[in-house]
Image: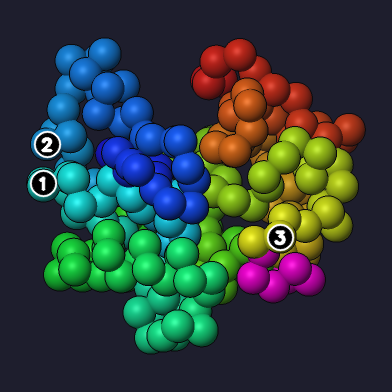
Amino acid sequence: MLVDCGIGPGPVAYFPGLAGRLEAALHEHAATLAEIDLVVFTHLHLDHLGWAPYLPNAAFAVAEAEWAHWAEGGDAAGKAHHVAAFRASLLPLAARVRRLPANGEAAAGIVLLPAPGHTPGHCGVLVADRLLIAGDLWHNPAQVAEPTWCHRADHNPAQAVATRRALGRRALLERWVVGAGHFETPFGRVTAGGFEPAGEPVG
């Protein structure tokens, strides 16, 4: 299982010079793209769905609100590069996409936790009530301590702020391990002072 699937093998015009390493990373662990059988999306921006067409045996799961936003929103759903990526990478695979309700389970113990604001149907992926894969809830560790600081890509900044406050508080109180893919050190915990990174995934 994957949570999100990066920018793809590249090249990607919006990210010149960057290419995804998923295939190579799997090879380092004696695995292949064909072995991935489930991808759970936090949201459907281009840097989260690029490998989807290269996963021949994968099913996909996404919040129904997120799917509806991109599938029904037309050109107004988001920036042109995100709309184009959705149409090219995921829309042709619609028959393999399960649309889940709020707090729906993608698999046993894998819950799509509503976290709107960055996109309308953005979710965190809560694993076994212990690990929150946060998607783009935070783009920088500073936002954990300063939740009012927004990324330019937040669709609804006020809602994104409210979500960061609410889920940051839950992560602190429930002692979740947090994984935030845009952080230099992506795993750690929310503390009273912000984000405490860990060198390796905790627990």
Q: Please state which of residues 39 and 108 is positioned toward the viewer in this rendering.
A: 39
| Residue lying at 33% horizontally and 50% vertically, measured from the top left | 50
Q: Please state which of residues 14 and 30 is positioned toward the viewer in this rendering.
A: 14
Span highlighted in magenta in the image: 154-159
Crowd tier of the residue under label 2, counting other residues whose Cα lies within 10 Å: few below 14, some 14–19, many 20 or above: few
Q: Please state which of residues 92 and 109 is positioned toward the viewer in this rendering.
A: 92
- Amino acid at dot 2: Ala
The image quadrant that residue 173 belongs to is top right
Picture disc at residue 57: 1
How far apart marks 1 and 2 lie (CA) works out to 6 Å
How far apart marks 3 and 2 lie (CA) works out to 35 Å
Q: Does the magenta stretch include residue 20?
A: no
Q: Position of residue 61 (x, y in %)?
A: 31, 59
How far apart marks 1 and 3 lie (CA) works out to 35 Å
Picture disc at residue 34: 2
Q: Does the magenta stretch include residue 158?
A: yes
Q: Where is residue 187 in the image (x, y as percent from the top left)?
A: 59, 27
Q: What element carries label 2?
A: helix
**According to the image, label 3 marks what residue?**
152
